Amino acid sequence: MSVEETLVLIKPDGVARNLTGEILRRIEAKGYTLVDLKLVQPERALLAEHYAEHEGKPFFEPLVEFMLSGPVVAARVAGNRVIEGFRAMAGVSDPTIAAAGTIRGDLGRDWGEKVQKNLVHGSDSAESAERELALWFA
Ligand code: RTP
Ligand code: MG
């Protein structure tokens, strides 16, 4: 067993579309544990830190604006190999090609020209998880 913790965000599109329960249900049904959970209206500074690796890319500003457009659910989720496991549950970034059975594949809509409404975020490595959990659950 390799019990890890990851940061899951339900992005503004997921909250606005009333998919919070469905997404948390999938996380719990998989056997992962919700260690901490909150509904937050993130500030720009937090999002700039969170997405620091994308600063300067053409989608950075639209992405931050999108993430500011409404409340976000932040969850500290624990489980055996949950970092990679949740990324697999989420599916690839583009919901139009994400596999059936994944959150983005089953529930995601268009991959817009600028703003990517793909419902969820999951930390992509142990280092990212540690950094992002410290930001969102300071
Ligand atoms: P996330 O970090 O949100 O879990 O998503 P990810 O790893 O699948 O995608 P990443 O490459 O880290 O990008 C973060 C978010 O930025 C938006 N994005 N837009 N080419 C584009 O226009 C583009 N690429 C990425 C998406 O919302 C993506 O989830
Ligand atoms: Mg990412």
Image (spheres, grey):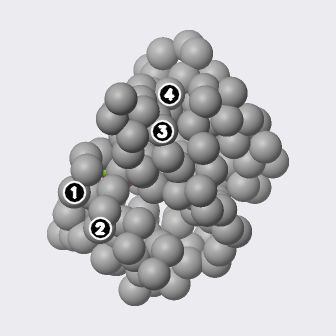
Q: Mark 4: which amino acid? A: Met
Q: CA distance from mark 3 to mark 1?
A: 16 Å
On screen, residue 35 above or below 41 = above
Asked whether mark 3 and ligand 1 are closer than 8 Å, the reply comes as no
Q: Mark 2: which amino acid? A: Arg
Mark toward the viewer: 3 or 1:
3
Residue 79, label in figure: 3
How many residues crowd mark 4 within 10 Å: few (<14), some (14–19), many (20+)? many
Task: Give the quadrant of the C terminus.
Answer: bottom left
Residue 131, label in figure: 2
Depth check, front residue: 8 or 58: 8
Residue 127, label in figure: 1
Q: Residue at x 51, y 84 (%)?
A: 43
For the residue labelled by badge 2, is the local secondary structure a helix, a strand or a loop?
A: helix
Q: Residue 6: x percent and y percent?
A: 42, 51
Q: CA distance from mark 2 to mark 3?
A: 18 Å
